Image: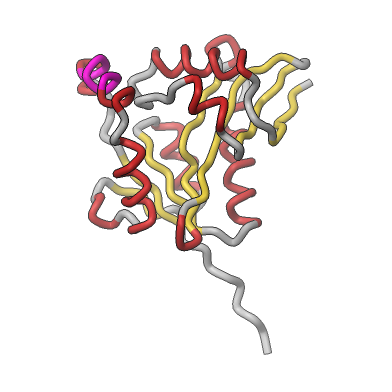
Amino acid sequence: MTEIVHRPLTPTEAVQVHRALKETPNILGYTVRELERLTDVYAAEVEGQFAGMCFSVDLRHGWTEIAALCVLPEFRGRGLGGALFEAAWERAQAGRRHVYVLSRNPQVIGWMQARGMDVGGKFRNMPLAVYWYMARHMASWYRTTEAIRKRKAIGQCPPLLQGIKRYAPESSQL
């Protein structure tokens, strides 16, 4: 049985995610301490066992960034990534928030397109709230060293694309 649960990561799960993120060039990563402090996390559990997570961050001016998605290698290919992304997406939509996603993963880009996001590589279109957050987030010694360590692998990856979806309230019918 598979469940998607909205809850923080346990210390053991934070270590598992940290290790998995160190193996992918798609995400520069997070320290174990950062992962343990996350509050808006969806965890995938397969028969009670932690299988992956997706987390988002609420930013200023009504924006939410779906920031990272990680399915542990032994659980890949079961649709967990899509279910985790959908849970984070639904939470943002229920809160009437604009959504921002940054990825080079073809599956994630497909999910962005399927939800009608404006997908592209022109970062001058990045919302100001996201820009402020990214500038602070990337000014991390850990992410700088990970970028240097992963530079060869990153160079062989597809381009980094952003997805932007502005919340459109339903028009009232008179």
- The kind of secondary structure the magenta stretch mainly shows is helix
Q: Residue 18 placed where, x, y %? A: 48, 17
| Residue 107, visible in the rendered structure | yes
Q: Residue 13 placed where, x, y %? A: 61, 17
Quarter placement of the N terminus? top right
- Given residues 138 and 48, the one toward you in this image is 138
Which residue is drawn at the image coordinates 67% and 17% (left, top)? 50
The answer to which image quadrant residue 129 occupies is bottom left
Q: Residue 2 placed where, x, y %? A: 74, 24
| Residue 83, visible in the rendered structure | no
Range of residues picked out in magenta: 145-151
Residue 92 relative to residue 109: left or right: right
Colour convention of the picture = secondary structure
Residue 65 versus residue 158 in the image, above or below: below
Q: Residue 135 placed where, x, y %? A: 29, 44
Which residue is drawn at the image coordinates 33% and 21% (left, top)? 25
Quarter placement of the C terminus? bottom right
The answer to which image quadrant residue 74 occupies is top right
Residue 1 versus residue 140 in the image, above or below: above
- Asked whether residue 114 is drawn in magenta, I would say no
